Image (spheres, rainbow, N blue to C red):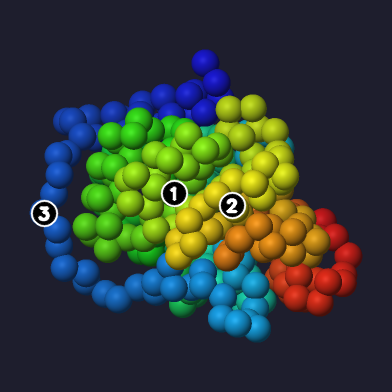
Amino acid sequence: MTLLEQIVERTRQDLAQRYPDGLPGPRPVRPATRLRPAFAAALRRAPGGTVRVIAELKKASPSKGLIRADFRPRELAIELAAAGAAALSALTEPHYFQGHPEVLRSAVEAVSIPVLRKDFIVHAVQLEEAWEWGASAVLLIAAALTPADYRRLYQAARAIGLDVLSEVHNREELAVVLDGGAHIVGVNSRDLRTFRTDLAGTAELLAAIPAGLIRVAESGIRDGADIRRLQAAGADAFLIGESLMRAAAPGDALRELLAAAGTGQGAETA
């Protein structure tokens, strides 16, 4: 069993524990109780505008262990938004990433930019949770879903007003999400089966995404040169977590990264 399969199985076990009377069926679409910032619009860079970065609130990962011991999501959210993040990504998966719903809720309450719920979504009830917690968008990982499940969850998310970042690792997964209607496609440089990072493969896959869709480069991005390379391949936005979370001052690290991406100069962020 791959690590991805282990995480998905643990997610299903957690859902069964949270809903001991059985997972709820589809719910009627409810009107939004409040406006929330649009995730998709935040990722489109205006000509000459700032590079669009989704800054990730990430305490730990399966491959790197603890990334940030001093993890205060509200303060980090405020700092990163002030530094120029276009959106935030909040980990809610508890066992492998040490995430929690409060990471998402505290970020939503603290900033005006959109926040993505990043988790291993396998059931529509997790979409409902994301909406209730204030998310503007959710992540759907093609490698964790059958094509039919992807289409069902994608449609359910859109029906309740959530944007969807559809994550792929190869051309087969790209075909699945395109067939399912994806409007924001993320290419993860880190293969969740092997946890190897391959920016060259990411550039090739970004170039294969049809024009008009929002293209997001994810993982393994450390400096301005990485951003410029992936922009040349078609990336509109960049999801960056580890390099920011390891920095003593994540806001300063993001400012340096944005400056380096825009000028072609600057040191690698740590």
- Residue found at x 64% / y 46%: 204
Coordinates of residue 260 in the picture (x, y in percent): 80, 71
> In this figure, which residue is indicated by the disc labeled 3?
28
Please give the label number shown on residue 166: 1
Q: Nearer the viewer, residue 265 or 28?
A: 265
Q: CA distance from mark 2 to mark 1?
A: 13 Å
Q: Which mark is residue 206?
A: 2
Q: Amino acid at mark 2?
A: Leu
Q: Which of labels 3 and 2 is toward the front?
A: 2
Q: Which residue occupies the extreme bottom position in the image?
A: 48
As drawn, the residue found furthest toward the top would be 1
Label 3: which secondary element: loop
Q: Amino acid at mark 3?
A: Pro
Q: Looking at this view, is 83 or 222 the one in front?
A: 222
> What is the secondary structure assignment of the residue under circle 1?
strand
Query: Residue drawn at (47%, 42%), measured in percent from left and top?
Result: 174
